[in-house]
Image (cartoon, rainbow, N blue to C red):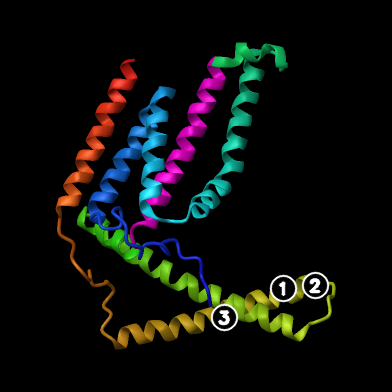
Amino acid sequence: MKHDFIDKYSSLDSVLHRVDPRVKLLLSFCFLVLITATYNIKVFALYLVVVAALLVTSKVPFHFYFKKLAVVTPLALLIAFFMFLSYLIEAGVEFSIAALPGYYPFLYTIALLVSKIYLSILVLTLLVSCTSFNSLLWSLRKYKFPVIVTTLSKLVYTYVFVFIDELHRTLRAYKSRTPVLRVSRVKVYGNIAAGIFLRSMDRSDLIYRAMISRGFTGDFPEGNSHRLKRIDIFAVLFFFSILIAARLIWKM
């Protein structure tokens, strides 16, 4: 079965892929905080240039990023619409094209909000695309994140594909036995859902027994350890250069 793994491009070879996962996780979090705390629209032009340069450096296909932005676009537009609608209601004014210049302060706020949403999604997608899921969990453990959370995240990420496999198999069997298009009933879909659930439980139990037989004790080994390299220092210096540039643009 083919699956759409969130880290399917983490095996590529680029400058960003070679940065230590702990450094990428920390800098991404700091960048998100910086984006959230910024309310000067001029600084977002700098952020956009930086993120665009990182996207090119990552060697990840651009359509992958566009898909993520397309998913969040309806939510961003919906939030912007309701914010503007609440502004009109609270101000007690009617919408008109001629009065658009008067809405500039509030439209400025909406533009900031949408920019923050898009840039945050791009930063998170870039982090996940250039770092394997196991490396992210390893980084969280190094930052003293609760072990139970990282272990459960690993198990959920592993077993969700077992459920997807059973879903594909069951739907394929259903289509092969009903080649003629018919009006399906709720009972049929209920039986299919129950069958998928039971078969997924049986298969996950077999996988868990196999893990126990191979010495699984409730925790995952760390695997390959990472060491800080010269490129990690350059990444930190690059982030501080962004801070300095943003500060200078802010004062302009």
Residue 189 is tagged as: 1
Separation of residues labelled 3 and 2 (CA atoms): 20 Å
Q: Relative to 31, does residue 213 appear above or below in the rendering?
A: below
Q: Which residue is mark 3?
A: 198
Percent x, y for residue 68?
52, 50
What label sits on residue 63 in the rendered view?
none
Horizontal and vertical percent for residue 50? 36, 38
Q: Is residue 57 magenta?
A: no
Label 1 is placed on what type of residue?
Tyr
Q: Amino acid at mark 3?
A: Leu
Query: Do residues under tags 3 and 1 come within 8 Å of each other at their CB atoms?
Result: no
Q: Magenta residues? A: 105-132
Per the rendering, the mark at residue 185 is 2
Say above or below: 91 vs 125.
Answer: above
Give the camera-side residue of 251 and 36. Answer: 251
**Residue ID at (51%, 70%):** 3
Image x and y of residue 172, in percent: 67, 80
Q: Where residue 14 sits in the image (x, y, percent)?
A: 31, 57
Could you tell which of marks 3 and 2 lies nearer the N-terminus? 2
Which class describes the residues within 10 Å of circle 1: few (<14), some (14-19), or many (20+)? few
Give the overall secondary structure of the magenta segment: helix
Q: Residue at x 73, y 80 (%)?
A: 175
User: Does residue 109 belong to the magenta stretch?
Assistant: yes
Secondary-structure class at tag 2: loop
Asked if residue 109 shows in the view, the reply is: yes
Residue 211 drawn above or below residue 142: below
Q: Quadrant of residue 102?
A: top right
Labels 2 and 1 touching (C-beta < 8 A):
yes
Image quadrant of residue 180? bottom right
Q: Say which residue appears at 53% left-offset and 79% top-offset.
A: 200
Which numbered disc, 3 or 1, marks the residue that appears first in the sequence? 1
